[in-house]
Amino acid sequence: MRMPTKPLELPAVQFPIVYHVGSRPRQRKQAGLDFGGWQSEDGDTLSVSLEPAAWRRRIGSRLRGKPTWALVRRDGKPGTFLAMGKLSSRLRTLLLTAAVEMRFVVPGTVYILASGDYEQRWYDDRDEALDALEGAKELRVKNPRLKARPGWLPLPSLLDRFGYTDPKLWLVPDFAILMVVETLKLFDGLWWSAATDPDPRSKLKDPPRGGIFQSRLPAWTAQQMKK
């Protein structure tokens, strides 16, 4: 497949200004180290949104007392973000194929343990998944079931990039796409119109948000907003 070389070939959204709630925007090295192992789709990007008040309500006490920053590009142009929610399956496959070629991930099999009692658990090792299934049965967990499906497994380059030793497998494709798009310098970052938890029973839903690539942060300026 031909790799897109222009932003117009991939779905994009543009914003003249975005907002970050938290510490002063800065470049950092590894998301896994910075956030104590916390993992989300935005990886090591700088989290931004159009609705800082909504983010404060969503995150709660962790953002209490934290300042809000308004970010604009230094060249006066709007920020351009890859619209993750608008990626077709063909484009996702194309980007993940590029991630394989760049040695960020390899295709493989993932095993998902689901039940009526707790959230899904993902494994990349069949024996470990089977042991977990047997353990769930011994504990009389309600209706445990294990299913295998094609997935993407992280390689050392991805693990080193984010500082994770045990990344959540459902996030690996987004981490890989993040690395591909940043490497190709097509966008300022990624944008999620409504990121949701992979567990279908979860009611958690984030407000629309984006992430500015670490390599693109020098192209932006941040101004602290008055309370």
Image: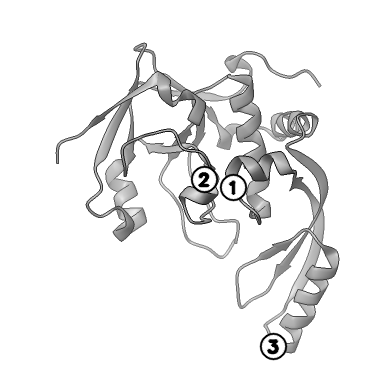
Q: Which residue is mark 3?
A: 139
What amino acid is labelled 2 in the image?
Ala
- Check disc 3 and give the amino acid type: Leu
Residue at image location 80% in from the left, 64% down from the top: 147
Confirm or deny contact between disc 2 and disc 1 (CB under 8 A): yes
Say if 184 sits above or below 199 in the image.
Answer: above
**In the rendered view, does 172 fall on the left or right side of 191?**
right
- The answer to whether 223 is drawn above or below residue 196 in the figure is above
Marking on residue 200? none
- Marks 2 and 3, Cα distance to the nearest angstrom? 35 Å
What amino acid type is highlighted by mark number 1?
A: Gly
Residue 166: horizontal and vertical position, in percent? 66, 56
Tell me residue 139's x, y (percent). Answer: 69, 88
In percent of the image, x 34 and y 38: which residue is there? Answer: 20
Residue bearing the label numbered 2: 31
The color scheme shown is: one colour
Identify the residue under disc 1: 163
Q: Are marks 3 and 1 in contact (CB under 8 Å)?
A: no
